[in-house]
Amino acid sequence: MAGVILPLDFPSGDEALELVDLLGETADFYKVGLELFSSAGPDVVRSLRQRGKRVFLDLKLHDIPNTVARAVQAAVSLDVELLTVHASGGASMLRAAREAADGRVRLLGVTVLTSLSGAEVEEVWGREIRSIRDEVARLAKLSVESGLDGVVSSALETSWLRRTVPEDFLIVTPGIRPSGADRDDQTRVATPADAVAAGSDYLVVGRPVTRASDPPAALAALLAEISSAQAT
Ligand code: C5P
């Protein structure tokens, strides 16, 4: 069954942990991203681990190999389960990350940020591209070859990506909107059923649950939608 990861996109540790305590046993996997990590630091990760929660540390590391390796070691010492690195950091950086991870944290490659347009990608790389999909495929391949454990992929790219990566390669998918939910600022969204059918291993679902007026009810509805999608 595809798992659910709830992003704790909050400005303070207190707000994040308030939601975690409200949801209690029904949610066990949380994503800590740049906002929360910058404001609350490793303490919020420790608080999550003390509550028995699994942690996806979404820091999108991109630096020289030695610096990234040391950051990965620090994340390992926090006992997180998933950690992101930018695949565009290059093969040596990715290999250094993998060696530092030493099987104790699973590394996910970020390929092309979904916020980037084709024109922006061309501007950054200084060459024409055929399509963003080609660039995603190239960086996913580099992630596989460098020994990463998976990638982050938008739901709309997951089904073809699933066919190009090894079976046990993790695909973690944000931009999910349960049927009827507000899209917020996400433009390329998919329903939980779409993401499950496309082959995602984990769905990252934020505001439809974390900003709902009744988060436990919204989460229960989401989990029901996922399990009925998997039953079909
Ligand atoms: O609230 P929402 O469901 O849009 O949150 C999605 C989470 O996934 C946020 O933490 C966001 O930063 C992250 N994300 C994303 N799209 C990507 C990569 C990450 O929405 N392409």
Image (spheres, rainbow, N blue to C red):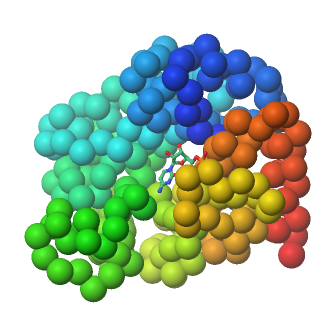
Compared across the picture, whether 212 is left or right of 186 comes to right
The C terminus lies in which quarter of the figure? bottom right
Residue furthest left as drawn: 126
The answer to whether residue 63 is above or below residue 161 is: above
Residue furthest bottom as drawn: 130
Q: Judge by depth and name the residue closer to the eye, 216 or 96.
A: 216
Residue 135 image-quadrant placement = bottom left
Residue at left 40%, top 58%?
Answer: 115
Compared across the picture, whether 112 is left or right of 188 comes to left
Residue 56 pos. (x, y %): 52, 39
Residue at left 26%, top 72%?
Answer: 119
Residue 81 pos. (x, y %): 51, 39
Compared across the picture, whether 16 is left or right of 90 comes to right
Compared across the picture, whether 176 is left or right of 97 comes to right
The answer to whether residue 80 is above or below residue 86 is: above
Residue at left 29%, top 58%?
Answer: 87
Residue 126 pos. (x, y %): 11, 70
Residue 55 visible, this angle:
no
Residue 178 pos. (x, y %): 76, 58
Residue 193 image-quadrant placement = bottom right
Residue at left 82%, top 68%?
Answer: 229
Total numbered labels placed on residues in the image = 0
The N terminus lies in which quarter of the figure? bottom right
Residue 115 visible, this angle:
yes
